[in-house]
Amino acid sequence: MVKGVKDGSSLDNSVPAHQTVRSVVKATQLLLLIADSDGIAVADLAREAGIPLATAYHLVNTLLAEGMLTRDSARRYRLGPKIATLSMAYSKIGPSERLLAAVRELAEETGETAYLSGWRDGEVVALATIEGTSAVRVGRIHSELRGNEHARASGKLMLAHLDPAALDAYIESHELARLTKATVRTEAALRKQLAEIRRRGYAVEEGEFTEGVGCVSAPVTEGATVYGCLTVSTPLDRFNAHRDELIDAVLAVGRSASSS
């Protein structure tokens, strides 16, 4: 499943404890544990959630019946198809002021065009953009920055953090179109890039999407989930001259925009 983009809302969602339903709280905890796993057994869920095994069985069976979970032949549970409905609905919410502030901070700190991206209807889309203050800057963002994830730093970053099944489905259903002479064209080369992105924690793209443009993207996370990314885009010669500073800036702002 392609995970939708959360908006990192700063609204106060606290509710008095006496107004909550304990079983719903526990079911939510189980969903989050399953989301952070690559399939998990009920016994492990019960242990990690600190609830009786019988309670865990009742909850996962209910979630399974409602289509919120799936179960494989090894009786390990994963998120189900109805989660995608919730994800897509949530993804329609615009970026929060906190995330918009992060884009502004990144543009001001680097002087380069900065933008926030996330999944929308199966594509990685630029959700908010602020142009840099440099005399020569990259302005081709907005609606043009969607799709062709294999050729974009932001797209590569988001692909790198898909679960394995979702990544396999994406690669199977998308052509690795050649946009420039530098564009990655083979599945093996793309998978190698994605593994390196997961290892080092950021994505770099040099002229793969647009000739003469370089980009670096860093994740925005909520807990262990990558739900968006921040990117700096700049003329390639300036990108190469200031690569380390740009990478450090994007990583730092990405960390500050993330929540635990």
Image: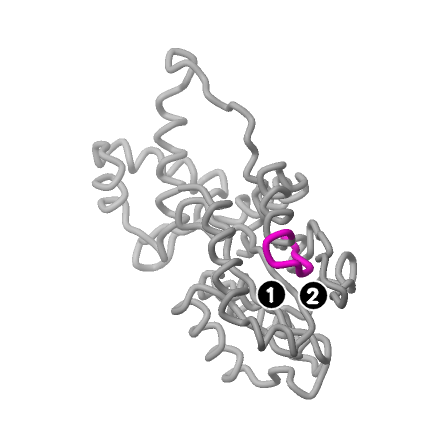
Residue drawn at point x = 48 percent, y = 72 percent: 194
- Comparing 106 with 88, the one in front is 106
Name which residue lies at 44% across and 42% down.
259
Q: Pinpoint residue 61: horizontal percent, then vertical percent.
A: 37, 39
Name the amino acid, label 2.
Gly
Based on the picture, tell me whether residue 109 belongs to the magenta stretch: yes
Residue range corresponding to the magenta coloring:
108-116
How many numbered circles are shown?
2
Q: With 34 as the anchor, is 131 left or right in this view? A: right
Please provide percent x and percent y for residue 201.
43, 64
Spot the residue most to the front. Answer: 135
The amino acid on which the numbered mark 1 sits, given as a three-letter code, is Gly
Horizontal side of 179 relative to 259 (left or right) equals right
The residue that label 1 is drawn on is 155
The colouring scheme, among rainbow, by chain, secondary structure or one colour, is one colour
Sequence-first tag of 2 and 1: 2
- Label 2: which secondary element: loop
